[in-house]
Amino acid sequence: SNKLKSIQQTQSRDKTTARNLQQQQTLPPKTALLVIDVQNDFALPAPSGSLSVPGALEVIPKINELRKKFPFDFVAFSQDWHRPGHPSFYSTHPEAKENGIQLFEKIQIHGRDQVLWPDHCKWDSYGAQFHPDLDYRNGDFVVQKGNRDADSYSAFMDNDREYPTPLHAELQWREITHVVVVGLALDFCVGNTALDAKELGYQVTVVLDLTRPVYQEEGVEMVKQMQGKHVRVVQSMDQI
Ligand code: VGL
Ligand code: ZN
């Protein structure tokens, strides 16, 4: 009878639902989007942006589109966040200037290279704020980095590898297995965040079209380094 048929259909639908639920629980690539340092100092053209990354403004609408297109389980934003007088600033090292070292050149701090950057992303400054067009939503997770003595390119840990940020713990309790990394800048903070994520055991994808390098050649080097560590590097969001 029709009634019996309808009951059978309902039962079969319930079984399918149960199977799907089970699959989702046991096979959950839970994926987080990590949006790196899309802040005014990097995104705005000079001189509004003090450490302007070429082409940075082009990536913002694409990052917004990515967020709308995929149902990410979690979205985290990193924010470069330096105190005044931070050791990564050229202005903090007048002795370097006296020795003929110029802006964007390297010195040794704690026995490792430190690029001397223009002042940028000082806490609470306009330059440190997310670019106003970025689809950042109230309540989104924000991880601030780079306020220790050591600089911090990676959103997971400072360059001296001493102080983890809260990002890994946050991803862990949310049982995130996969991360997609986009933002600024490819050759520094995006690349180092992706490399750390890989080392921490995540499956990592970097979307080139949604990031820009400070230096073109160093961007190419970073891509090679990431590929050597089995970070998945794709051209556009269609390939995620
Ligand atoms: C960055 C240089 C200095 C970045 C941060 O976000 O890539 N680059 N601080
Ligand atoms: Zn910085």
Image: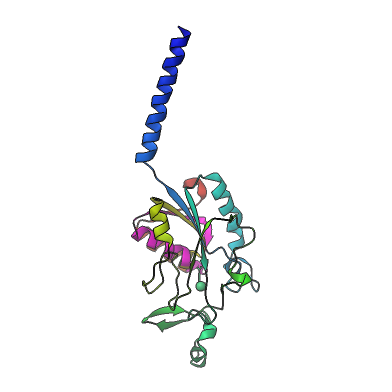
In the orientation shown, which residue stands out farthest toward the top? 1
Which residue range is magenta in the image? Answer: 189-217
Question: Is 228 covered by the magenta stretch?
Answer: no
In the depicted view, which residue is nearer to us: 191 or 24?
24
Label tally: 0
Above-or-below relation of 10 to 122: above
Residue 199 visible to the viewer: yes
Return the x and y of residue 111 as percentages of the image width and height: 36, 82
Left or right, 228 with respect to 131, comes to left
Residue at 47% x, 9% y: name it: 2
Above-or-below relation of 177 to 84: above
Left or right, 8 with respect to 128, comes to left
Above-or-below relation of 80 to 141: below
Return the x and y of residue 217 as percentages of the image width and height: 47, 68
Say which quarter of the image contains residue 197: bottom left
Residue 213 visible to the viewer: no
Say which quarter of the image contains residue 150: bottom left
